[in-house]
Amino acid sequence: MDFGFGSGDEAFRAEAREWLAGHLVGGFAELAGCGGPGSEHEGVEGRRAWERELGGGGWIGLGWDCAEGAYGNRVASLTRQVVWAEEYARAGAPGRVGHIGENLLAPTLLAYGDEAQRRRFLPAIARGEELWCQGYSEPDAGSDLAALRTVAVRDGAGYRVSGQKIWTSLAGAADWCFVLARTDPAERRHRGLSFLLVPMDQPGRVEVRPIRQMSGTAEFNEVFFDGAVAGHVVGGEGAGWRVAMGLLARERGVSTLVQQIGFAAELGEVLGAAVRCGALRDPVVRDQLIRQWAELKVMRWNALRTLGAAGDAGAPSVAKLLWGGWHQRLGELAMRVRGAAAALGPVDWTAQAPYELDALQRLFLFTRADTLYGGSDEIQRNIIAERVLGLPRVERI
């Protein structure tokens, strides 16, 4: 595509920059840096308030495929969505707690939901008032999502959901969860699944348990459903796999470019550590830093190349393989440039705070999961092999 910023885009940039400068003040300014990868647990209540601030300014839902203001959101072109994402990252604004609702659920409802569902949920997301989490992965169905065991049984006009989901980001703060569950026990694999919307505030029926990680924090959760009520099914009963795959395809595009801005900042921190530690004198380390920089540039141009493209079955998998491996290598490099000092924490160990880590140590530990979550590298390669190269599909039991 012919990608470039016009005069209108630059005027939009000035508006975004001015708004962020005027609103990232006081308590919101103190949230700078909160909520990035490996620190989603930080400042959640303050970030919820920031979400409402964004909604009040009309900055949520810029990329929704709907008429301007249809659900309380403004609509922006792809280039202006990129402009907003760039200015947001450069302003050091906090990690978004509403991104799952805005960037995953909302486009899915616009594509597969009915108008009543859109009217019920989209305005609340646009105002920053309701937060969402994603109920896909299970203990025995992570990358192999079709092997899930969560079931939903018809109960009047809705369903009763029972089962367990895992690795659920922001489950403790979310108001709703979109859940993929089996509604037809006679079917197997991807058939007989439905995409349900489940309120999280159901005491005794929905339980959230934080998963403590080796970093000492809990970025993810287990969620247990015990007859939880779900009153909405998106796309119709049995269409869950089609809806779920449509949602996953939306995890690329502008959001990928936002991610890369964060990656660039992290690379800068690693470079700074290399300068301070004298690691730049090592030609191997210099080569690795240059390679990381060059690969990040390639990822950006690949993201721009596929931005807004439809029908490319392999694009999401290629993007995931690129950034997952790149980010993991960056975490390893962050430790390598510091040498033996990388094994020491910023403060002395205590029983009350045994896992005090600095930013680069958290980066290293968190990136170990980059090639697993969101679909493992093996699964992404299978998708490319089957859907792009046309190789024989392997039957999974």
Image: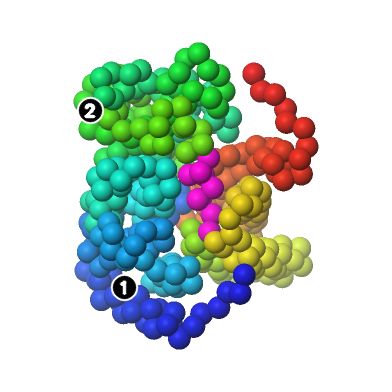
Who is closer to the viewer here, 351 or 337? 337
- Where is mark 2, residue-wise? 202
Residue 38: image location, x then y, percent: 45, 48
- Where is mark 1, residue-wise? 20
Residue at 22% from the left image edge and 64% from the top image edge: 56
Which numbered dot is residue 46? none
Secondary structure of the residue carrying tag 2 is loop
Residue 386: image location, x then y, percent: 72, 38
Residue 127: image location, x then y, percent: 24, 57
Task: Name the colour scheme.
Answer: rainbow
Residue at 34% from the left image edge and 22% from the top image edge: 161
Q: Residues within 10 Å of mark 1 (few under 14, many from 20)?
A: some
Who is closer to the viewer here, 212 or 183? 183
Q: Mark 1 and mark 2: span between their CA atoms? A: 36 Å
Q: Amino acid at mark 1?
A: Leu
Q: Kindly tell me whether residue 143 is visible in this rendering.
A: yes
Secondary structure of the residue carrying tag 1 is helix
Tell me: residue 272, above or below residue 344.
below
Indicate the quadrant where residue 85 lies.
Answer: bottom left
Instruction: Specify start and end residues of the magenta stretch as a single range.
Output: 245-253
Q: Magenta residues: mostly which secondary structure?
A: helix
Tell me: residue 364, above or below residue 11.
above
Residue at 55% from the left image edge and 27% from the top image edge: 190
Residue 328 lies within the magenta run: no
Of pointers 1 and 2, the one earlier in the residue sequence: 1
